[in-house]
């Protein structure tokens, strides 16, 4: 079977372009002509380029902030007593994101056709979180859809707050790294080649540091095209690996093992898990189903793999706290809180407490990380720049010291 890109005219006169899978081009032409379609263009896709393009393609996404605003408006309309279809009509007109608007139009058609709201959102695939569809389903069963939306809005705000803190803490170190790279590139491609010409006229023996920098700058200038191709190829290979199942797990495991940053990543994944699980259980969704949904909403494939194992063990009758402890990724404090929650029947409350505790831990780790990274980066930049400047000026100092006046 091969994949073809077909541009054709429908019986209605509309011209469309679609990807079709068929055995041969001739068989596909016959099949389309039998359906009264006029084939305008038909080309076979290269399977290698097709798979690479699919892996590198950007998935359509809806910004979390825009989805939060939608749910706030949706909840307000439902609380005011408006029917779901009327509420969707109002909200569709207010959407500026074309992907979001098209999805909502499809959801409205499905709901009008008899599907439930949760089924209509599930039919959109990965465009919306599965957690959201599950929350809607619990609200539809209990008849408390506005309350469920309110809980989901609170959950989304908590997650977005933590994300902002993490991203905000990493902005300054990232800027320092970029500045360091720019300075080194300017030195290697502009400053050092200019001094290399001067060194040649001096006729003195260069120190090994200076000779190393000059040779490196010369090599980069003469080989920048192959090096650029290798860098681009490396980036593409890395993206393809990162999007593969093994690459996702390997990349997340690598991130969690980084000094300073790894602890924040682990705490953030745990916070998402406890927040999500608390939200689902509060909505009346059974524990095993909630565990599976919460595991897939963590955003960390190492955590997800371990938590799906927890789901299996809980389904077999093992206590939740014991299953979480066996993963080795959930903190002792969170395990203890879950244990107390299971024994006292207050699991939702204890999960909320564990989430608040992990948020405090994230704040502490972030402040500690920023306090340590900023001076380290400044010292690193100073050493690199100072070392390069000294390597450039050492031959000049030697030339002046050996000259006779």
Image: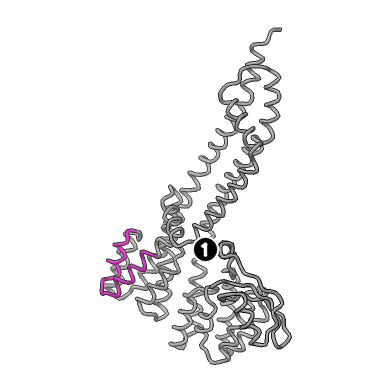
Main SS of residues in magenta? helix
Q: Nearer the viewer, residue 223 or 386?
A: 223
Identify the residue position indicated by label 1 in the image.
Answer: 161
Relative image position of residue 160 (x, y in whole percent)? 53, 65
Image quadrant assignment for residue 41? bottom right
Q: Nearer the viewer, residue 117 or 8?
A: 8
Residue occupying the point 49% across, 57% down = 241
Label 1 crowd (10 A; few <14 / some 14-19 / many >=20): few
Relative side of 129 to 305, left or right = right
Determine if the magenta segment contains residue 326: yes
Residue occupying the point 29% across, 62% down = 326
Residue occupying the point 41% across, 51% down = 257
* The furthest residue to the top: 405
Quick check: 358 above or below 75?
above
Relative image position of residue 43 (x, y in whole percent)? 65, 70
Relative side of 80 to 12, left or right = left
Relative image position of residue 18 (x, y in whole percent)? 64, 76
Magenta span of residues? 305-328
Quick check: 226 above or below 66?
above
Relative image position of residue 137 (x, y in whole percent)? 46, 83
Q: Which of 192 and 261 is in front in this view?
A: 192
């Amino acid at each position: 079977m091969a994949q073809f890109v077909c541009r054709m005219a429908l019986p209605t006169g509309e011209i469309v372009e679609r990807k079709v899978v068929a055995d041969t081009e001739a068989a596909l032409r016959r099949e389309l002509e039998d359906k009264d379609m006029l084939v305008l263009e038909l080309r076979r896709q290269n399977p290698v380029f097709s798979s690479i393009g699919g892996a590198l393609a950007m998935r359509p996404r809806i910004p979390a902030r825009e989805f939060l605003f939608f749910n706030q408006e949706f909840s307000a309309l439902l609380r005011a007593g408006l029917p779901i279809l009327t509420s969707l009509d109002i909200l569709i007109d207010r959407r500026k994101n074309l992907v979001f608007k098209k999805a909502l139009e499809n959801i409205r058609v499905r709901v009008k056709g008899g599907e439930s709201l949760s089924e209509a959102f599930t039919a959109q695939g990965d465009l919306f979180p599965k957690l959201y569809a599950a929350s809607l389903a619990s609200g539809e069963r209990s008849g408390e859809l506005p309350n469920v939306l309110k809980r989901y809005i609170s959950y989304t705000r908590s997650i977005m707050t933590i994300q902002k803190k993490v991203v905000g803490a990493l902005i300054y170190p990232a800027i320092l790294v970029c500045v360091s790279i720019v300075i080194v590139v300017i030195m290697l491609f502009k400053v050092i080649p200019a001094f290399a010409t001067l060194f040649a006229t001096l006729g003195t023996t260069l120190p090994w540091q200076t000779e190393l920098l000059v040779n490196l700058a010369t090599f980069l200038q003469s080989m920048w095209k192959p090096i650029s191709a290798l860098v681009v190829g490396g980036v593409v290979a890395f993206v393809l690996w990162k999007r593969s199942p093994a690459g996702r797990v390997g990349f997340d495991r690598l991130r969690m093992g980084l000094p300073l940053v790894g602890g924040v990543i682990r705490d953030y994944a745990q916070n998402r898990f406890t927040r999500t699980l608390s939200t689902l259980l509060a909505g009346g969704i059974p524990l095993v189903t909630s565990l599976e949904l919460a595991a897939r909403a963590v955003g960390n494939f190492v955590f997800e793999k371990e938590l799906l194992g927890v789901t299996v063990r809980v389904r077999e009758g093992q206590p939740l706290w014991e299953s979480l402890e066996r993963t080795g990724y959930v903190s002792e404090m969170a395990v203890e809180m879950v244990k107390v929650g299971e024994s006292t029947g207050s699991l939702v409350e204890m999960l909320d407490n564990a989430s608040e505790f992990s948020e405090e831990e994230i704040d502490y780790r972030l402040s500690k990380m920023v306090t340590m990274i900023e001076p380290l980066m400044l010292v690193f930049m100073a050493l690199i720049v100072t070392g390069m400047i000294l390597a450039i000026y050492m031959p000049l100092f030697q030339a002046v010291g050996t000259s006779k006046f």
